[in-house]
């Protein structure tokens, strides 16, 4: 190998080393303890939400999980849904409604107060719909469901 080739490799090695060093310093950052604490807080898992039973009686945690004789779980049982899911037509209608509301706001055809009123109405529906539906089911059936989960 000639001397020019070695010099070229040495320059390349020094350049790569310098770039890696700069990259490492950039990634390490100069963060303050407050920033580190905020980052650690964002990385924590969310708090569990404990839902109390509607009737005041403890909810019995029964599992439909099936097990083989040797103790390993069987995943052969098909999962069952808690309720009927919305179909594609209903989802499409909801998307159109929300898109139209956003477009009206951008275009200025509705006032900000009217937009906020409609958003509050939708949020209220989302918050209360589950409990209202459960009460309707209980009225129709006469007996409360054995277990309710949100």
Image (spheres, grey):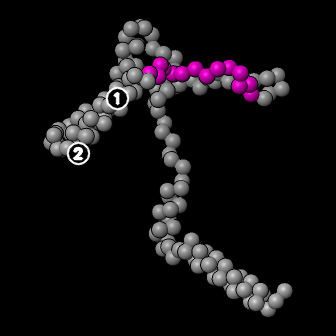
State which region is magenta.
73-87
Q: Where is residue 75 in the image (x, y as percent from the top left)?
A: 71, 25
Q: Position of residue 140 (x, y in %)?
A: 39, 8
Name the disc covering residue 72, or none.
none
Residue 79 covered by magenta stretch: yes
User: What is the quadrant of the N terminus in the image?
Assistant: bottom right
* Sooner in the amino-acid sequence: mark 1 or mark 2: 1
Above or below residue 60? Residue 118 is below
Q: Is residue 1 left or right of residue 55?
A: right
Which x, y percent locates residue 129?
Answer: 35, 25
Q: Where is residue 6 in the image (x, y as percent from the top left)?
A: 78, 87
Q: Which of 27 and 129 is in front in this view?
A: 27
Q: Count the numbered circles shown.
A: 2
Using residue 42 as the reference point, say whether residue 25 is left or right of it: right
Q: Nearer the viewer, residue 15 or 90?
A: 15
Please say if 12 is above or below 39: below
The residue that appears at 34% across and 29% down in the rendered structure is 94
Q: Are marks 1 and 2 in contact (CB under 8 Å)?
A: no
**What residue does disc 2 label?**
106
Residue 116 seen in this snapshot: no
**Residue nearest the viewer, comparing 26 with 14:** 14
At x 59% / y 74%, what residue is drawn?
A: 23
* In the image: residue 36, left or right of residue 67: left
- The residue lying at 46 percent from left, 69 percent from top is 34
| In this rendering, the label closer to the viewer, 1 or 2 | 2
Q: Residue at x 40, y 22 (%)?
A: 89
- Residue count near mark 1 (Cα–Cα under 10 Å), binned few <14, some 14–19, many ≥20: few
Q: Distance between the residues labelled 1 and 2?
A: 19 Å
Residue 94, label in figure: 1
Q: In this view, does 133 lie to the left or right of 101?
A: right
């Amino acid at each position: 190998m000639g001397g020019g080739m070695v010099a070229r490799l040495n320059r390349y090695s020094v350049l790569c080393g310098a770039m890696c060093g700069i990259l490492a310093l950039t990634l390490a950052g100069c963060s303050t303890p407050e920033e580190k604490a905020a980052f650690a807080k964002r990385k924590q898992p969310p708090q569990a939400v404990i839902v109390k039973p509607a009737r005041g009686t403890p909810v019995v945690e029964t599992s439909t999980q099936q097990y083989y004789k040797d103790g390993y779980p069987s995943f052969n049982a098909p999962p069952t849904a808690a309720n009927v899911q919305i179909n594609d037509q209903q989802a499409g209608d909801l998307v159109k409604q929300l898109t139209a509301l956003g477009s009206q706001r951008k275009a200025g055809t509705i006032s900000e107060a009217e937009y906020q009123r409609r958003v509050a109405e939708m949020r209220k529906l989302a918050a209360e719909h589950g409990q209202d539906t459960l009460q309707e089911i209980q009225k129709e059936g006469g007996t409360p469901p054995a277990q309710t989960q949100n």
